[in-house]
Image: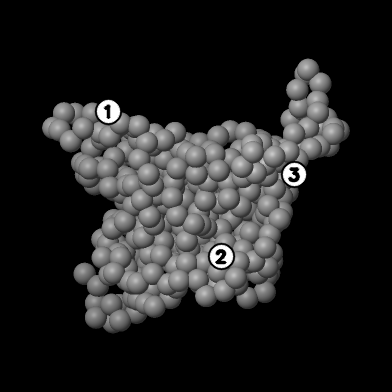
C-alpha cells in the first residue's frame, strides 16, 4: 500500500470520462486555414494529358483524368523513408526535451469531447442471447461505436497505410504523426518502406488528403509478434511532408503514472478491421488501464500498459488519451500495441490482456521529435 508521502507525490490524474462527457461543446471562433491537400499521387512519366472534368450536370463533382496506355498507370513513386533510431546517447546529447507537452486546437475547429455516431450500414446485430463469433479480443460486451466527426480532437486521428497493411495514427505535432512501430513496414536491412497517413479517413474519403512520411523516429524496430519489452517500446513518430498539424491540430502528451491504474480516465480511437473492414474509425469511452509493467531498452524506461478494453487488428497505432482539468485538448499516454488473443472472453489476470505501449520512453520520443522537427 502506498504511504501518505508517496500518495502526495503521485501526479494528478486526468478527469474521469463520466465528467468529460458532460463538458460543453465549444464552437469554432475563427476561419479555417487554407491548405493544398494531395488527392492523387501519380508517376509523372506514366501519366500524360492531365485533365479536370465536371462529372455531372450539377457541377458538384470534379473528375481528374490522365491518359495512359493499355498497360495502365505505373505504381506511384512514393517518398523514400529516412529511419532515425533514437538512442540514449543521442537523446541525452539533445537540448532540453519536454516530457510533457501541450496540444493545439485550431480556432477554426469545433471542440467536442465525445465524437458523433456514424450512420449505420448493413444489418444490425440481433438483440438476442445467441453466441456470435467476433474477431479480435472483446471482453464481454463490445463498447465501441463507429463515428464520423471532423471536430477536434477526432479529426487528429486517421488511417495509416503501408505496403504491409493498415493501422491507426494520430497527429502529435505540426508535422508529426504517432503510430505503432509494428505498423511500419521495416525492410530488414535497417530501413523502412513507404507509409502514409489520412486524417479523418472514412469510407474511402480523405478530407485532408493522403499524406506521406519522409522520416520515421523510433527506439526499436518492432516485428509483428512482440515480447513485453518490444510492446513497451512499440511506437514511432513519423515526420510528414506536409504540416498537417497546423491545420487540424494535435493532442498533447504526458507520461503514464502507475497511480492511475484502475481509473476510468481514458478514451481510445482506431480503425478496427472487423468493423466495416477498417473503413470507419471506432471510439471507446470509459477505458481503464489495469496494470503498468516496467521494461527497459538501451538505458531508457518504458511501460506495458495492460487493459481489458476492446482492441482488435487495425486499431494498432491509435492513441489512448485522457483530459486534464479545463484543457481544450487531450493528452496521449499510450499507443495501441498488442492483442491478448482472438477470443471473446472475460478479464482474468494479465496473461490474456490487451496492451498499450507507453511510459517515459514514449514521452521522450515525442518530445525529441517536437524539438528537432518543429
- Image disc number at residue 249: 2
10 Å crowding of disc 3: few (<14), some (14-19), many (20+) = some
Q: Position of residue 225 (x, y in %)?
A: 47, 36
Is residue 241 visible to the viewer in this orientation of the structure? yes
Residue at the outermost front position: 57
How far, Cα to Cα, is label 2 from label 3?
A: 24 Å
Closer to the observer: label 2 or label 3? Answer: 2
> Residue 284, how many percent across, how many down?
34, 52
* Residues at marks 1 and 2, CA–CA distance in whole angstroms: 38 Å
SS category of the residue bearing label 1: loop
Count of numbered labels shown in the rendering: 3
Contact? badges 2 and 3 (CB < 8 Å): no
Q: Earlier in the sequence, mark 2 or mark 3?
A: 3
Between discs 1 and 2, the one toward the N terminus: 1
Q: Is residue 242 left or right of residue 354?
A: right
Which residue is the site of mark 1?
A: 133
Label 3 residue SS: loop
Crowding near the residue tagged with mark 2, few <14, some 14–19, many ≥20 C-alpha atoms within 10 Å: many
Residue at 36% x, 60% y is 114
Q: Quadrant of the N terminus?
A: bottom left
User: Which mark is drawn over residue 79?
Assistant: 3
Q: CA distance from mark 1 to mark 3?
A: 40 Å
**Residue count near mark 1 (Cα–Cα under 10 Å), binned few <14, some 14–19, many ≥20:** few
Q: Earlier in the sequence, mark 1 or mark 3?
A: 3
User: Is 188 placed left or right of 158 in the picture?
Assistant: right
Residue 37 x, y percent position in the rendering: 68, 52
Picture coordinates of residue 345, whole percent (x, y): 23, 37
Q: Nearer the viewer, mark 1 or mark 2?
A: 2
- Which numbered dot is residue 232? none
In the displayed structure, 343 sits above or below 181; it is above
Amino acid at each position: 500500500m502506498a504511504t501518505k508521502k508517496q500518495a502526495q507525490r503521485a501526479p494528478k490524474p486526468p478527469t474521469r470520462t463520466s465528467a468529460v462527457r458532460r463538458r460543453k461543446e465549444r464552437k469554432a471562433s475563427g476561419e479555417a486555414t487554407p491548405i493544398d491537400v494531395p488527392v492523387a499521387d501519380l508517376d509523372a512519366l506514366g501519366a500524360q494529358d492531365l485533365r479536370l472534368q465536371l462529372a455531372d450536370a450539377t457541377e458538384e463533382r470534379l473528375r481528374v483524368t490522365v491518359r495512359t496506355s493499355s498497360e495502365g498507370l505505373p505504381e506511384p513513386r512514393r517518398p523514400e523513408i529516412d529511419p532515425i533510431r533514437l538512442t540514449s546517447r543521442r537523446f541525452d546529447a539533445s537540448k532540453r526535451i519536454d516530457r510533457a507537452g501541450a496540444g493545439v486546437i485550431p480556432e477554426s475547429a469545433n471542440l467536442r469531447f465525445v465524437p458523433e455516431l456514424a450512420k449505420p450500414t448493413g444489418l444490425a446485430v440481433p438483440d438476442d442471447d445467441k453466441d456470435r463469433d467476433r474477431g479480435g479480443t472483446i471482453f464481454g460486451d463490445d463498447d465501441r461505436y463507429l463515428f464520423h466527426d471532423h471536430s477536434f480532437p477526432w479529426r487528429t486521428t486517421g488511417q495509416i497505410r503501408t505496403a504491409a497493411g493498415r493501422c491507426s495514427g494520430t497527429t502529435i505535432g505540426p508535422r508529426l504523426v504517432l503510430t505503432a512501430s509494428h505498423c511500419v513496414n521495416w525492410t530488414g536491412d535497417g530501413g523502412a518502406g513507404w507509409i502514409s497517413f489520412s486524417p479523418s479517413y472514412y469510407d474511402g474519403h480523405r478530407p485532408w488528403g493522403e499524406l506521406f512520411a519522409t522520416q520515421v523516429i523510433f527506439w526499436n524496430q518492432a516485428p509483428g509478434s512482440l515480447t513485453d519489452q518490444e510492446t513497451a517500446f512499440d511506437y514511432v513518430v513519423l515526420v510528414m511532408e506536409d504540416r498537417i498539424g497546423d491545420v487540424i491540430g494535435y493532442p498533447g502528451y504526458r507520461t503514464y503514472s502507475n497511480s492511475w491504474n484502475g481509473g476510468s480516465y481514458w478514451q481510445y480511437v482506431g480503425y478496427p478491421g472487423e468493423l466495416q473492414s477498417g473503413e470507419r474509425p471506432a471510439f471507446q469511452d470509459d477505458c481503464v488501464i489495469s496494470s503498468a509493467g516496467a521494461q527497459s531498452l538501451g538505458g531508457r524506461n518504458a511501460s506495458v500498459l495492460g487493459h481489458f478494453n476492446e482492441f482488435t487488428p487495425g486499431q494498432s497505432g491509435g492513441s489512448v488519451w485522457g483530459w486534464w482539468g479545463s484543457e481544450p485538448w487531450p493528452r496521449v499516454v499510450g499507443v495501441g500495441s498488442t492483442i491478448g488473443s482472438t477470443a471473446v472472453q472475460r478479464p482474468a489476470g494479465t496473461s490474456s490482456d490487451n496492451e498499450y505501449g507507453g511510459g517515459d520512453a514514449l514521452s521522450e520520443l515525442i518530445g525529441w521529435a517536437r524539438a528537432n522537427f518543429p
